[in-house]
Image (cartoon, rainbow, N blue to C red):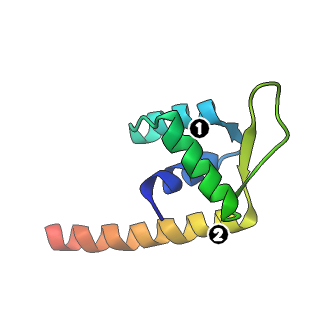
């Protein structure tokens, strides 16, 4: 899974958000600025893969939320990162 897709899943893990809120959230917790093309490409890809779903539009904004499959994939990815991090920390010390 690409890093951008993981960042989007993490952002949505605490509840539905629209695109700008996702972009702002990712900037805050990861220090990464995603351009609109990158963000909406990731949202489209995640939606196509059944990992998130678009909710009814709130005026101009369309919120997204994780699906059950999206939550499961996020847990798997975070477990993988944890395993990699623990290995790297052992090797680095």
Other-residue count near label 2 (Cα within 10 Å), few / some / many at <14 / 14–19 / ≥20: few
Q: Which residue is mark 1?
A: 22
Q: Residue furthest left?
A: 93
Q: Residue furthest right?
A: 56
Q: Is residue 6 above or below residue 1?
A: above
Q: Which mark is residue 72?
A: 2
The residue under the point 51% across, 56% down is: 6
Nearest the viewer among 79 and 9 is 9
The residue under the point 17% across, 73% down is: 91
Query: Percent position (x, y) of residue 73?
Result: 60, 68
Quadrant of the drawing holding the C terminus = bottom left
Nearest the viewer among 34 and 21 is 34
Q: Is residue 34 above or below residue 46?
A: above
The residue under the point 45% across, 34% down is: 27
The residue under the point 68% across, 60% down is: 48
Could one spot residue 93 in this view of the protein? Answer: no
Dot 1 or dot 2, earlier in sequence: 1
């Amino acid at each position: 899974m690409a890093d951008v897709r993981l960042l989007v899943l993490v952002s949505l893990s605490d509840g539905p958000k629209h695109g700008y809120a996702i972009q702002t959230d990712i900037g805050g917790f990861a220090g990464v600025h995603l351009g609109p093309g990158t963000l909406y490409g990731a949202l489209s890809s995640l939606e196509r893969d059944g990992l998130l779903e678009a909710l009814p539009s709130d005026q101009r904004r369309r919120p997204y939320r994780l699906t059950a499959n999206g939550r499961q994939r996020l847990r798997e990815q975070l477990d993988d990162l944890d395993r990699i991090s623990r290995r790297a920390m052992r090797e680095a010390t």
